Image (tube, rainbow, N blue to C red):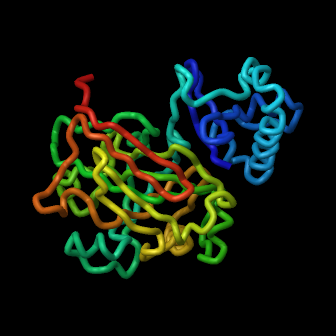
Amino acid sequence: MRLVTYTFRGTTRIGAMLGDADVVDLARSARVHQLAAVPDNMLALLDGGDAAMAAARAALDAAGKSSSKSRDALAAAGVIFGTREPGFRFEAPVPRPPKVLAIGLNYRDHAAEAGAQLPKQPVVFTKVSTCIIGHGAPIHRPMVSTAVDWEGEFCFVIGRRARHVSAAEAPKHVAGYTIGNDVSVRDWQFHSGTWMMGKGFDTHGPLGPYLVTPDEAGDIQNLDLKTWVNGELKQSSNTKHLIFGVGELIEYISKAFTLEPGDVVFTGTPAGVGFSRKPPEALKPGDVVRIEITRLGVLENPVIAEPES
């Protein structure tokens, strides 16, 4: 499934993609088709575990089977609608994650362009949950800096509590995968050794558009990742080049603290970021950042000046 959180006509709910242009409201589909209830927000769905996911899949399947014959009726019931309809907006799949973690220097080529040694353990830092925005939402160039950079990233979302989990068992704890942009304010990033201040500005964690379940994501160790700014290709790599993969990251992180349903992990960015270019490049108002990962879709966000209020 490609799960989404969306706002439509002023109401925010969860759904799943039916084809490339339609969304099924899972909770409403479950009611209309008299199936097991489905939660109406992503954290509740993830907290519900396997039973909630099975109910969501059943609601999606029921809507898909009946849509060819009764799409108008389903649309009238608020079950199915087009993503291009007026008033529709993608939100981040998990709009306010319990934790947002990120990994630094996790591609060899990015470590090389940053002039850093390859890490012996994952370089883990935090982003702030208020940085998370969805596909299409604007990235703010903050009032206090012009050194804003892009970082296209492969991300995963925890679906089951994880503490002292082995790498082999780690996939059982993943709800799905998505695309992220670890937008970085470079001067603020290096105010101190923790990086957090430069990584957690409001709007600097675009995420989405979908949460793609593992069965649909396929082989996550062979996904192409590409980032464009204003149509110019800036980053091109593949998840096979990650130094620490999903299993290793969950094993390492869960030794220290509990990973919970809804937690998001940005796994790191490959080479091609702006500050390493000669001359260095930075995002400015009017730019558009587009990130594409195989089978995970496209995350695109415009850049604007931070509003004064």
> At 33% across and 47% down in the image, what residue appears?
200
Q: Nearer the viewer, residue 196 or 39?
A: 39
* Image side of residue 65 versus residue 244, left or right: right
Picture quadrant of residue 27: top right
Residue 302 % position (x, y): 33, 37
Quarter containing the C terminus: top left
Query: From what the image shows, is residue 297 above or below residue 237?
Result: above
Lateral position of residue 258 relative to residue 117, left or right: right
Q: Position of residue 254 (x, y in %)?
A: 54, 68
Residue closest to the far left: 279
Q: Measuring 62% from the left and 72% from the top, which residue is drawn there?
A: 165
- Place residue 133 in its image quadrant: top left
Whether residue 246 sits left or right of residue 288 in the image: it is right
Quadrant location of residue 235? Answer: bottom left
**What residue is at 26 percent from the left and 80 percent from the top?**
117
x, y percent for residue 223: 51, 65
| Residue 201: percent from left, percent from top | 30, 43
Q: Relative to residue 54, is residue 92 depicted above or below?
A: above
Vertical comparison of 25 with 49: above or below: above
